[in-house]
Image (tube, rainbow, N blue to C red):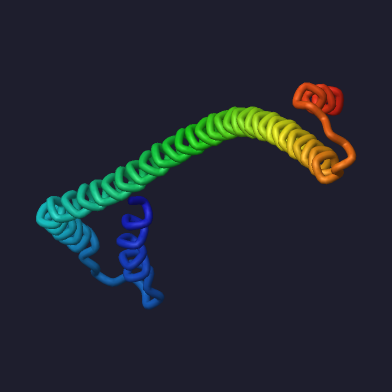
Amino acid sequence: MKKIIFLCLVPMIIIASSHEGVKDFDIIPRTLNFLIFFGILFYFLKDYAQKAYKDRINLIASKLDAIQNKLNDSKSQKEQAAKDIEEARNGAARLMEVAYKEIEIIKQKTKENAQIEINNLKKSYENKKEFEAKKMTKQVVNEILNQSLDNDSMKFSQKDLVNIVYKKVV
């Protein structure tokens, strides 16, 4: 405001200080006319200037509000991302826990199945061994009987044959 008054008064001072001597200047009426002109100009432009000023303030306020909203949205998204990360960590921890439990269960089942398979193989081996022993016993009995029966010099009674077979088996 002081600058405007200064700029308005400078031309008057320049005009008032001429080097030619004393002249009849109408400085007071010109100053009054200038002030009246400036007052009328201010009166007509005041509303427009105030409106422009208020619009500028409102524009800046709306931009500030928009920036504040974006900042709040960013903060909420950051918080949501932090919650999602925490949930993901908890989920991963639960999955790891479940995976370890499943591994233990699978190990136990595999161990049990292997033990069952080993027991089945042992039983099968024992059954096969018994079968082979019976087969060999039959073969030996057949050989002895065939040799005994083929040999004409040896005549055994049925009772003797049963005793011989019994002795071989035992």
Residue 169: image quadrant is top right
Q: Residue furthest right?
A: 153
**163 vs 54, nearest the viewer:** 163
Q: Residue at x 33, y 68 (%)?
A: 11
Residue 33, percent from left and from top: 15, 60
Observer able to see residue 170:
no
In the image: residue 109, left or right of residue 74 = right
Q: Is residue 85 left or right of residue 68?
A: right
Work out which quarter of the rendered image holds the C terminus and state it. top right
- Using the rendered view, name the quadrant where residue 48 is placed: bottom left
Q: Foreground: 93 or 33?
A: 93
Q: Residue at x 80, y 38 (%)?
A: 145
- 163 over 138 or under it: above or below: above
Counting from the top left corner in percent of width and height, residue 3 is at: 37, 56
| Front-most of residues 62 and 87 | 87
In the rendered structure, the answer to whether residue 72 lies left or right of residue 165 reads left
Closer to the camera in the image, 115 or 1: 115
Q: Residue at x 20, y 51 (%)?
A: 55
Q: Please tell me whether residue 68 is drawn above or below residue 44 in the rendered image.
A: above
Does residue 159 appear to the left or right of 24 in the view shown? right
- Counting labels gives 0
Question: Does residue 106 appear in the picture of this structure?
Answer: yes
Residue 124 in percent (x, y) is at 69, 35
Q: Position of residue 81 (x, y in %)?
A: 46, 40
Residue extending furthest toward the bottom? 20
